Amino acid sequence: MHICLASIHPRALSGQIEGLAALARELERSGHKVTLVSAFGEELRRQDRLALAERDSESLFGKLGRIGSILAGLARQARSADLVHINLPTPAFSILGDLLQQCLSVPVVVGFEAHLADGRRLRQSGDLWASPQFYLPKMLVNNGLLARCGWHGADRYIVSSHCQAAELLRLRFPPARVSVLPNLVDMDKLQRIDQSEARRQLGLPEGRLVGYVGHYNPVKGVDTLIRAFEYVSQHFDDCRLVLAWSGIGDPGPIERAISDTGVGHRVLHLGRAPIGALLSALDVLALPYRLTMGQNAYPGLLLEALGVGVPLVTSDLPLLREVVEHERTALLVPPEDAVATATAISALLENRDLGSRMAAEQRWLLRGPFSPPQLAKQYVQLYRHVCSGEAPARTPFSAPDVVVLRASRQIDSADEHPLVSSARPRSGPTPPSGRPGSSG
């Protein structure tokens, strides 16, 4: 099968682009021909894509201008393909998929990389007014009104999470054409190495290391981590905080938080680094998401952490609970709760056995239910059903219709999505007996 994979995402250092490259690689390994269409062209096939990140600083108008060239290139490449799979940011961009389906003579599969902005949550929490320059543009673009403007005419829609599936049903996407399949991560770069060797490679000291990796956008909650680390540093004299900033987002609020808490002498600014070595070097990884809005679903860094196996503290949000389970694969804490975050980090620094068990469970997930080769086979199966015009194929990740419909009914405003639900969704696939931590 010849598959044309495309994305309009403008940033190389993103879970969206990483997921596209990982899917392309696994499809090719299974014998399929893949053509990549994106802002980065065939350069996405490079194993080390850090150099591509220099383009992430391009202006907004430059990034918007690239969308037209990407779609034009996709139209040319699609002539020789059996199927087009294009990933769009959120359902608010679904009309692009509709237009492609009308213009192309091959089936079109549309993937949505993230969910819509939660307007009510942003207004009620005060986050919108605290960082309007970040949140307001996303609310204006990624909202339910725009998502309803299209006619939802693509052959199939793929989302990674059940939260997203519920959102599509609320927006009146045809249920029979919605499939849930997780995004892939590149396991080739996630080989765990000895902690001392990883620290030597990165120039990091011995002692306890708590780390953060990613952007400094407000949704990431890095300011909460800084406040939490103030408490942690008072209890562990040898503990340091490693900030591996991607270069995206305003560093000002983070620098002010470091100054206000007086932990600057304990903070190591690492910048961009090879992810496998960095995660291997840490004692605890903290991903204190304020919201999952704007994140790849599922967050690529979360899946990468599971692939390496590292004691993890992250936020108790419905999208994340689909992947990790509290006290089994991560410690989950309320968003923006610095005290709870500090308590969880301290628990993992003190209880190395808990961290080791957690890491073993994590690695099982990425070599079992979230295994890239296995997921690629499910993508191919779905592609074949689309090309043949057969009924949708169920996959191990397809939520029962009643579960998705129940989540859909829990949303009662045009700009909300399943993240406002108080119901606790399932915590990832149920593992078979005999894996690490099982009693069978």
Image: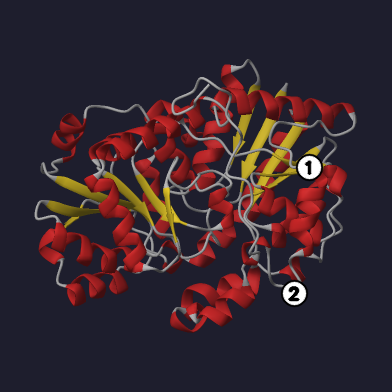
Quadrant where the image shows the N terminus: top right
222 or 85, nearer to the observer:
222
In contact (CB < 8 Å): disc 1 and disc 2: no
| Three-letter code, disc 1 | Pro
Q: Residue 363, located in which quarter of the rendered image?
A: top left
Label at residue 400: 1
Q: Is residue 380 left or right of residue 341?
A: right
Label 1 residue SS:
loop
Q: Residue furthest bottom?
A: 129
Question: Does the image show residue 425?
Answer: yes
Residue 75 location, quadrant: top right
Task: Indicate the amino acid at tag 2.
Answer: Ser
The spot of residue 15 in percent (x, y) is: 49, 46
In the rendered image, which residue does mark 2 sit on?
A: 413
Residue 281, how many percent across, how many down?
23, 38
- Alpha-carbon distance for marks 1 and 2? 24 Å
Q: Is 427 situated above or below 292?
A: above
Q: Residue at x 61, y 73 (%)?
A: 139
- Mark 2 surroundings: few (<14), some (14-19) or many (≥20) residues within 10 A: few
Outermost front residue: 439
> Residue 39: which numbered mark, if any?
none
Whether residue 107 sits left or right of residue 419 in the image: it is right
Q: Earlier in the sequence, mark 1 or mark 2?
A: 1
In the depicted structure, whether residue 439 falls above or below residue 340: above
- x and y percentages locating residue 156 in the rendered image: 80, 42
Q: Would you say 307 lies left or right of 225 here? A: right
Residue drawn at (13%, 41%), measured in percent from left and top? 203
Q: Give whichever of 319, 58 is nearer the camera.
A: 319
| Residue 164 image position (x, y, % from top left) | 68, 53
Observer-nearest of 312 and 435 = 435
Identified at 69% across, 27% down, the residue is 378
Q: How many marks?
A: 2
